[in-house]
Amino acid sequence: MSSIEEIHERYIQLCPEDGIDENVLKKIEEILQLKLPDDFRDIAKFYSGDLLGGISCFAFAYKDIAPNIVDETLRLRNAIKLPSNFVVLAEPPNSIIIMDTQNNPSIIWCDATDVERIVTMSFISPPDTWKTFFDFFTKLVEDEEEEQLE
């Protein structure tokens, strides 16, 4: 298993470093009223969302950037009563990728038809899951490395 430092090195070989600072992370936590996982915070220092490994993640920064994780999370909290421990990371076609800030698996990629089942975790189609944000991010980096080799 690689470390944050190793995945950081692999990432900057593929993409420019574009992280967000600690104040932005604190503001995200304040607005969403949750605690971001440590691995997410560490990775956000050099990756702030965007296209990676074929997945376009929402921007982590929330001011003057749309779509972003704050606005999209608040939108789904209003639209489907998304529980307050979830952060919306991306909405690939016909699906959604969310981060559970309190439980494992931390990252859940489910069909759009299953979004309202997030509360009960009783999905019709089994979602793809990753235990941590670090695991998910590693998968994105691996996929990006493969894409750039082709």
Image (tube, rainbow, N blue to C red):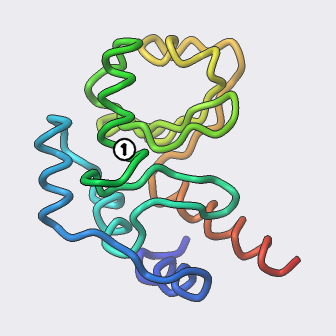
Closer to us: 102 or 82? 82
- For the point 46% across and 11% down, which residue is it? 120
Please state if 3 lies on the left or on the right of 73 as rendered. right
Residue pictured at 48% horizontal, 18% vertical = 118
Q: Is residue 116 above or below residue 126?
A: above
Disc 1 residue type (three-letter) = Ile
Residue 31's image quarter? top left
Q: Is residue 77 left or right of residue 98?
A: left
Location of residue 40 with respect to 68 vertically, above or below: below
Residue at 42% across / 69% down in the picture?
47
Looking at the image, the residue that sits furthest to the right is 150
Q: Residue furthest front?
A: 64
Q: Nearer the viewer, residue 34 or 129?
A: 34
Where residue 48 appears, as percent x and y from the top left, is 39, 64
Vertical order, 45 against 62 (above or below)? below
Q: What is the quadrant of the C terminus in the image?
A: bottom right
Q: Position of residue 102 (x, y in %)?
A: 29, 36
Q: What x and y, as percent, mark residue 109?
A: 59, 35
Quadrant placement of the N terminus: bottom right
Q: Which residue is mark 1?
A: 69
